[in-house]
Image (spheres, helix red, strand yellow):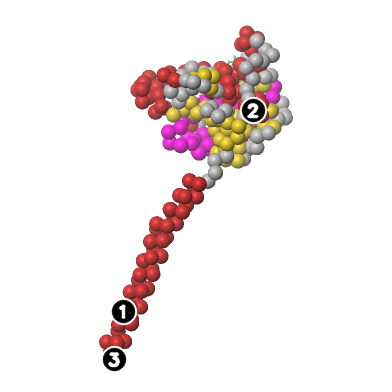
Amino acid sequence: MVIKWKVPVIVTVAVLFFIILILIIIIVLFLPYNKGREEVVMETKEYKLSEPVKKGNMSLEEAIACRRSVRSYSEGKIEEKDISQLLWTAQGITDEMEGLRTAPSAGALYPLEIYIAAAMVEGIEAGLYKYNPLNHSLILKKYGDLREDIYNVSLRQDSIKDAAAVVIYCAVFEKTSSRYEDRAEQYIYLEAGHSAQNIYLQAEALNLGTVAIGAFNDKGIKRVLELTDEEHPVYLMPIGKK
Ligand SMILES: Cc1cc2nc3c(=O)[nH]c(=O)nc-3n(C[C@H](O)[C@H](O)[C@H](O)COP(=O)(O)O)c2cc1C
């Protein structure tokens, strides 16, 4: 009798132990796996930008002669085609065969990555987007107006708060240092300068205002934009109506 009574208890304990073990395995392994899968299958939102124009109304000489840093902007939205034009001018592809772009790059390695925090742009929902030169498109990173957050980590410069959109130049230094080692840093800052001048001149030709901003808190920008460890902010350019 005693032995018969003890056997079911041991079996019950063993079964319970087995169930708990299975539950622990599910919690430890299965749930994180599913979470990872959700992230992987999450749809990427990519928006094709309108075709950039290659002929404008202002001559290059006029744009150079008139260019000024503009820090205050009138209210109102700018247009999607303006953003398309400005991003193309910054890093657009001008040689499909070789993949060469509007601005020069040491070894054609193209370490610059351009984000745009759109806020007051007709046809583009407020949010943070990454420019994809290959498709001339915007890849959505997150929705929302980020101007206030960027302003707070950029010495509270009003040009950022009042802009219709803010272009944020970032760079992946490893792309260039893998070939040029310790020359990479200066090459990247030079490249950002080439590209930013294109934006200055294109903005002038579109009758928009912009200013190159180097005074910001790197860690703050990284946090606000949720940049990856390899992406580093190098320049900001608010864009607005003159
Ligand atoms: C590397 C660099 C960093 C700059 N940073 C800022 C900045 O943080 N804020 C700002 O208002 N202007 C900034 N500027 C713009 C300069 O103040 C401006 O170019 C200068 O006053 C000359 O005026 P101009 O651009 O109208 O010719 C920067 C310019 C450069 C080249």
Question: Which amino acid type is marked by label 3?
Answer: Met
236 in magenta: yes
For numbered disc 1, what is the local secondary structure? helix
For the residues marked 2 and 3, what is the alpha-carbon distance in whole angstroms? 86 Å
Residue 1 — which label? 3
Q: Give the range drawn in magenta.
A: 219-242
Question: Which amino acid type is marked by label 1?
Answer: Ile
Residue drawn at 54 percent across, 44 percent down:
43
Q: Mark 1 points at which residue?
A: 10
Residue drawn at 35 percent across, 78 percent down:
12
Residue drawn at 57 percent across, 36 percent down:
46
Identify the image quadrant of the N terminus: bottom left
Of the pair 174 and 49, the residue shown nearer to us: 49
Residue 50 — which label? 2
The part of the image, by quadrant, that contains residue 56 is top right
Of the pair 186 and 81, the residue shown nearer to us: 81
